[in-house]
Image (cartoon, grey):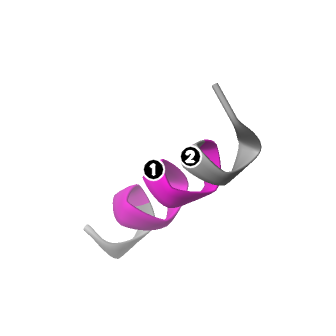
Amino acid sequence: MSPMHSITLNHMASRQ
């Protein structure tokens, strides 16, 4: 998994 994808998932989880 690319770091960019991981950051996107982490950002979405943080918004919830």
Task: From the viewer's perspective, tell me whether residue 3 is left or right of residue 7.
Answer: right
Tell us which disc is closer to us: 1 or 2: 2
Residue found at the far left of this picture: 16
Task: From the viewer's perspective, tell me whether residue 6 is left or right of residue 3.
Answer: left
Residue at 37% x, 56% y is 13
Residue at 45% x, 50% y is 9
* Residue 9 versus residue 11 in the image, above or below: above
The quadrant of the rendering that contains the N terminus is top right
Looking at this view, is 13 or 9 the one in front? Answer: 9
What type is the residue that disc 1 sits on? Leu
Is disc 1 in contact with disc 2, using a CB cutoff of under 8 Å?
yes
Disc 1 and disc 2: Cα gap in Å?
A: 6 Å
Residue at 25% x, 67% y is 16
Instruction: Sort mark 1 into few (<14), some (14-19) or many (20+) by Cα contacts within 10 Å.
Output: few
Residue named by callout 1: 9
Residue found at the far right of this picture: 3
The answer to if 4 sits in the magenta stretch is no
* Residue 13 versus residue 6 in the image, above or below: below
What type is the residue that disc 2 sits on? His
Task: From the viewer's perspective, tell me whether residue 5 is left or right of residue 12.
Answer: right
**Of the numbered discs in the image, which one, if any, rests on residue 1?**
none
Dominant secondary structure, magenta = helix
Residue at 56% x, 46% y is 5
**Residue 14, located in which quarter of the rendered image?**
bottom left
Residue named by callout 2: 5
Q: How many marks?
A: 2
Residue found at the far top of this picture: 1
Residue 15, horizontal then vertical, whole percent = 34, 74
The residue stretch that appears in magenta: 6-13
Residue 11, horizontal then vertical, whole percent = 49, 66
